[in-house]
Structure formats: C-alpha cells, structure tokens
Image (cartoon, grey):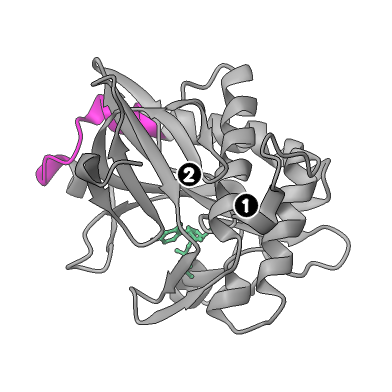
Amino acid sequence: MNEAKRLYEGKAKIIYQAEEPDRVYMSFKDEATAFDGKKRGLIAGKGFFNAQISAALFQYLEGQGIPTHYLGRADERTLIVRRLAMLPVEVVVRNLAAGSISRRLGLEEGRPLHPPVLEFYYKSDALGDPLINEYHIRALELATPAQVAEMAALAERVNAALSPHLRERGLILVDFKLEFGLAEGRMVLGDEISPDTCRLWDASTQQPLDKDRFRRDLGEVEEAYAEVWRRVTGGESQWSGGPQSA
Ligand code: UDP
C-alpha cells in the first residue's frame, strides 16, 4: 500500500485510496485498544483474522440481499471496499445482555433480550461515543429519519441472517456493532464484522471468543480470534502463508 494514498488511520484499521476513486483499501492491524483507548495491546494475527472473518461475513450477507461495501480481497489483511460517506452513528444490536447494557440497566450477563435491543451511539472519540436516540440523531442532524429507519431495518436483517449462520458454527451472537454509509445516496453496510465488533460466545461452553478476552484479561486471546476464523471461514485462506505470515 502506497503511503501517499493513506486517507485515514484508526485504532484497528488503515484506509487507503485505491486507483479507482470510488474504492478504498481497508487494512486491518494487530493493534488492539479498549476502554476508549486507555488499554492498548497487540493481538498477533488479529489483522489477518478480522479481515478474513469480515470478508466471509460480508459475502454471506450480500448473498442474503444485504448491501455491503465489500468488493474483494487485496492481500491477506486488506479488503477492497466501496468508498462510503460514513454516517457518524454506530448501531448496536443485542440478543443477550452483556457489557454496557448489563452495567447500565443492572441486567445479568447472558439474559436473553426479546425482542433484540437496538441502540444508537454517536461516533465521537472526544465524547466517548455516547448512547443517543432517534431524537438526538435528528436534532444533531446526524442522519434523516428515513436513514435512521433504514439503518434499523438493515441492522435487524443482519441480525436475523447472522445469528443462525453463526449458531450453526457453534457461536452465539450475543451483540454486535454496525456502521453504515452512503454510496450514490444508497444506504450500505460498511466497517467490519469481527470479534472486535461482535460478542461471540462458544455455544457449548458459553465462553467468550471475542475482544472481551483482551478487555478482561481472560487469556488465550489469539486462540479465540483463530477459532472464530476457523469456524466462520472453514480455516481456508486464499493466501499461501496463512495466519503465520500476517
Ligand atoms: N462495540 C464496538 N465498538 C465500540 C463499542 C462497542 O464494536 O466502540 C461493540 C462491542 O464489541 C460489543 C457491542 O458493540 O459487541 C456492544 O458493546 P457495549 O455497548 O456493551 O460496550 P462495551 O461493554 O464493549 O464497552
């Protein structure tokens, strides 16, 4: 990737401009952060695993009729994606209580939520991504009411498609975060879908196989990402080196 074309570097990914103006490269890093960047570390191979897991899940969702930014793979940790005008809103879907909702509402971890709970967060590092609702989104002009409705409907469809798909692979989709953007006025699913952005519990042991292993110092962090990669992709890589060369 040509340094001159670097558009943006975030905590877990770097975005590069592709030759085509409507495409970018999304390169996944091994660096990990938690608690608003207060905790930092390296998870060896995470960039490879998250790129491959995201690619497989975006491909699956496209097959289910959900528009995503995914176009293909550039190298073992880099995806080719459509360039989107991102909306500054994170959409979280929760099937079981965990993390911030357990703390905020005093819910036992693992308590089922029927119907699944949908939340919006304002994407702002300076403010620590605060929880917001449709009224905030409208008043702050973060998105139109029609766009909010479309994000919510797509998030519910993603959940309905992904939950059984992962369950068949021995993974419980506890909760996850999505980000959306616009391409030629059309709402498209962007960002990533990985153990960094989903809570995934092993269906037989209920143990987390996601970033909570890093957040909570549970150990076997790399192994968890590798296990999700194996279950989601079948452990096949298009790249000769596999995870070791990542
Ligand atoms: N999440 C994320 N990015 C964020 C915040 C949350 O990907 O900036 C994901 C997180 O991994 C989990 C879900 O969204 O799968 C819900 O996270 P929660 O609100 O419980 O926050 P946490 O307890 O992780 O701080």
Residue 222 in percent (x, y) is at 67, 68
Give above or below for 61 relative to 213. above
Q: Which residue is mark 1?
A: 49
For the record, the magenta segment spans 138-151
Asked where in the image residue 164 lies, by quadrant, the reply is: top right
* Image spot of residue 25 (x, y percent): 38, 36
Near-viewer residue (184 or 78): 78
**From the viewer's perspective, is 240 left or right of 130?**
right
User: Which secondary structure class fits the magenta region best?
Assistant: helix
- Residue occupying the point 21% across, 59% down: 124
Residue 209: image x %, image y %?
70, 64
* Residue placed most toward the observer, 244 or 158: 244
Q: Nearer the viewer, residue 54 or 149?
A: 54
User: Cβ(mark 1) to ligand 1 < 8 Å?
Assistant: no
How many marks the image carries: the answer is 2
Tell me if I can see residue 171 in this picture.
Answer: yes
- Using a 10 Å C-alpha cutoff, classify the residue at mark 2 as few (fewer than 14 neighbours), some (14 to 19) or many (20 or more): many
Which quadrant is home to the N terminus? top left
Question: As shown in the figure, which amino acid type bears the numbered disc 2?
Answer: Glu
Nearer the camera: disc 2 or disc 1: 1
Mark number displayed over residue 192: 2
Q: Is residue 110 magenta?
A: no
